[in-house]
Image: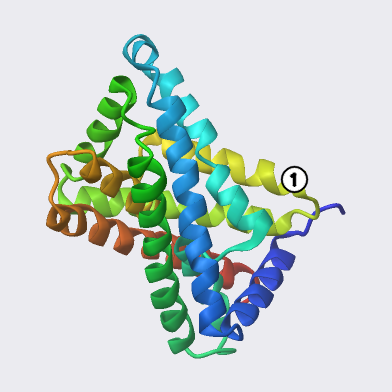
């Protein structure tokens, strides 16, 4: 076959988890900076294209969502193909090895902490330096979209945001899971594109993407405080993303294909 089957995917994931566990924290941190920047670049592209078509958003909102979601996967494609360390994918990778007692639960906790911080810093660099300092979103149409997206993301109840985070990372972790099935770059890109486009078009919440979207809106003057960002969005989304990746993907596929 020109792709790995489901059981072989879990074996691939276990190898990735072992490799990540054995990587020095400094390299993990640098890789996580890159991943934060890559996801921010995909988010930036989505704002520049999908956020600049208000007429389509008014008359054909489904098409606008498709355009916005259709370019966003750039970030995860860069993570998967070029190589980087993304928190949301990592929530799933370690689970089969932990449950099969090949590694301690302390290993993913350490990795998640380093990668989360690195992703946050990488996203903020792109948000401030590339999206704000350059003024590339100052166009009135794009600016309105940028601020509206940021303000909308902090307006939902805690549990609604958490559940949206669960579904999002169910899709993201599945995208990476399918990417591991691929034996060529084009197949990896196709495997990643559909679920990532889908979660964005459906409006679910990704913590690393929000590390770009909401700070960018704040930098441009949105009516959002940093406390709101953390309490009303980042915390519930992060919790939801962990559940979505660790339980709905990592645990499910461990039980199906790795549990003795």
Residue position for label 1: 187
Q: In this rendering, would 250 be left or right of 53?
A: right
The answer to whether residue 225 is seen in the rendering is yes
Left or right placement of residue 5 versus residue 223 in this view? right
Q: Position of residue 114 (x, y in %)?
A: 42, 76
Q: Quick check: 51 above or below 22?
A: above
> What residue sits 68% from the left and 55% below the top?
81
Q: Which of 71 and 34 is in front in this view?
A: 34
Q: Which of 255 and 18 is in front in this view?
A: 18
* Residue 210 x/y as whole percent: 33, 50
Residue at the location (76% across, 49% down)? 185
The picture quadrant where one finds residue 242 is bottom left
The answer to whether residue 140 is above or below residue 213 is above
Residue 164 placement (x, y as % from top left):
32, 48
Query: Which quarter of the rendering shows the C terminus?
Result: bottom right
Regarding residue 201, the answer to whether it shows in the image is no
Residue at horizontal 43%, vertical 60%?
122
Examine the rendered structure and indicate whether residue 172 appears above or below residue 221: below
């Amino acid at each position: 076959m020109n792709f790995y089957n489901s059981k072989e995917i879990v074996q691939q994931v276990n190898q990735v988890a072992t490799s990540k566990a054995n990587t020095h924290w400094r390299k993990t941190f640098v890789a996580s900076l890159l991943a934060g920047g890559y996801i921010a670049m995909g988010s930036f592209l989505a704002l520049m294209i999908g956020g600049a078509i208000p007429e389509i958003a008014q008359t054909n909102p489904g098409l606008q969502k498709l355009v916005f979601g259709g370019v966003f996967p750039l970030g995860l494609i860069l993570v998967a193909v070029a190589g980087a360390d993304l928190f949301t994918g990592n929530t799933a990778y370690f689970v089969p090895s932990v449950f099969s007692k090949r590694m301690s639960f302390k290993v993913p906790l350490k990795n998640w902490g380093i990668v989360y911080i690195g992703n946050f810093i990488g996203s903020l660099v792109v948000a401030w330096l590339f999206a704000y300092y350059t003024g590339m979103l100052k166009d009135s149409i794009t600016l309105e979209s940028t601020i509206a997206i940021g303000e909308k993301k902090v307006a939902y109840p805690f549990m609604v945001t958490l559940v949206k985070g669960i579904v999002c990372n169910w899709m993201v972790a599945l995208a990476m899971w399918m990417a591991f099935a691929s034996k060529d770059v084009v197949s990896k890109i196709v495997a990643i594109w559909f679920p990532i486009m889908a979660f964005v078009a459906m409006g679910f919440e990704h913590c690393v993407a929000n590390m770009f979207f909401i700070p960018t809106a704040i930098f441009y003057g949105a009516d959002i405080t940093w406390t709101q960002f953390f309490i009303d969005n980042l915390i519930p989304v992060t919790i939801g993303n962990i559940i979505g990746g660790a339980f709905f993907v990592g645990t499910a596929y461990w039980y199906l294909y790795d549990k003795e």
